[in-house]
Amino acid sequence: MPPPIKGHSRGSPPISREEAERAIETVREILHLLVAGPALVRGGPEGWHVDVPVMYQGYALDRIHLDVDKMEPSPKGRPARSSREVDPNEIRGKAEEIVSELRVVDAAEYREPEKCWVVPLAWGPYLVAHVKISSDGREVVPDYGLTEEVRRYVY
């Protein structure tokens, strides 16, 4: 049975090393269940920008910036731009390949305002995404804003 989706919680629970390790293990458990969502393609004065949502059970967890000129991820924090217009359908296969090549970094950050662990995902030498896990290390915390963006963009 895959880990459940985290609901909203209140209070600030104490944290422990064991919970951080459990959060990392939870991300390892779901890694093979992650899929690429539909490419989010946007054009603007600086060029075309493509994000690939990382999806779990219909919820978006984070976005991967895609460098479409190289057809590989761009490091977290560096949205790549392209001068050429991009068709979302041309990205689908490559996006799935990239998500299948993600690996879990053996570390976790704690974010107090969200009361969750954040476990980074890497592709090659780059950190490209994060997965949020509940403070007890057991439940996946979706990016609800990105999930809504994906649903608006696609439907």
Image (cartoon, rainbow, N blue to C red):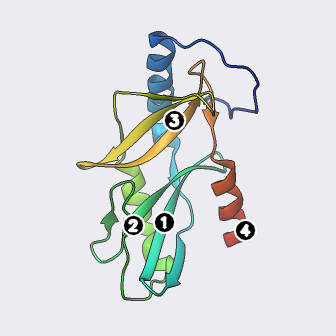
**Identity, as a three-letter code, of the amino acid under mark 4:** Arg
Calculate the distance from the C-alpha at mark 4 to the C-alpha at mark 3. Answer: 25 Å
Residue highlighted by disc 1: 51
Nearest-to-viewer mark from 4 and 3? 4
Given residues 99 and 74, the one toward you in this image is 74
Figure quadrant of the N terminus: top right
Give the mark, 1 or 4, whose residue is nearer the N terminus.
Answer: 1
In the displayed structure image, the side of residue 67 where residue 59 appears, left or right: right
* Residue appearing at x 41%, y 39% in the figure: 120
Residue highlighted by disc 3: 30
Nearest-to-viewer mark from 3 and 2? 2
**Identity, as a three-letter code, of the amino acid under mark 3:** Ile
Calculate the distance from the C-alpha at mark 1 to the C-alpha at mark 3. Answer: 21 Å
Residue highlighted by disc 4: 152
Decide: marks 4, 3 in contact (CB < 8 A)? no
Given residues 91 and 131, the one toward you in this image is 131
* Residue appearing at x 60%, y 22% in the figure: 135
Q: How many labels does the image show?
A: 4
